[in-house]
Image (cartoon, helix red, strand yellow):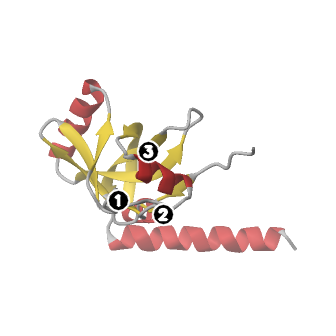
Amino acid sequence: MKTQTIRIKNKRASFEYFLEDKLVAGIVLTGTEIKSIRQGKANLNESFCSFVGNELFVREMHIAEYTMGTIYNHEPKRDRKLLLNARELKKLRTKVNEKGFTIVPVSLFINGKGLAKLEIALAKGKHHYDKREDLKKKDTKRELDRLKHF
């Protein structure tokens, strides 16, 4: 049986933020949630991470209900705990307490062992002129690639 690779990306994260440090965190899921992720039915577009006590949670991450689930199916937008060691959590907390930094999920994937992992990034918000500059770079790159093919 061929296994397909699951990698769900948050495309808005790199457009809305400057991504500084990236970390890979484990995520606490229920049985129906991991089955939905394996089907590729998750969305990271509006999600963000925040601290509750000494633990980091991802919020507003949408994982669609499992179609074959019963009454014990999961809630699609519940808060999910991220698994990081104490040193990483302390580093993230000190950076988030600085002005302008936040933690955003970048991608959700299944690793080689079959476990769901969430790649998070320490991010700083972009201004409108930064976003326009990125769009200009993207357009010029597309034009150059188009001209190379002729």
Across and down, in percent, residue 1 comes to 75, 44
Find residue 113 and report its image quarter: top right
Across and down, in percent, residue 73 comes to 36, 58
Mark number for residue 119?
A: 3
View extreme (right): residue: 150
Q: Nearer the viewer, residue 89 or 40?
A: 40
Q: Is residue 129 above or below residue 87?
A: below
Assess whether mark 3 and mark 2 are in contact (beta carbons under 8 angstroms).
no
Q: In this rendering, which labeled residue sits more in front, label 1 or label 2?
A: 1
Mark number for residue 61?
A: 1
Amino acid under disc 3: Glu
Q: With 1 as the anchor, is 133 left or right in this view?
A: left
Gap between marks 1 and 3 measured at Cα: 13 Å
Across and down, in percent, residue 60 comes to 29, 61
Q: With 117 as the anchor, is 145 left or right in this view?
A: right
Query: Which residue carries the number 2 mark?
Result: 11
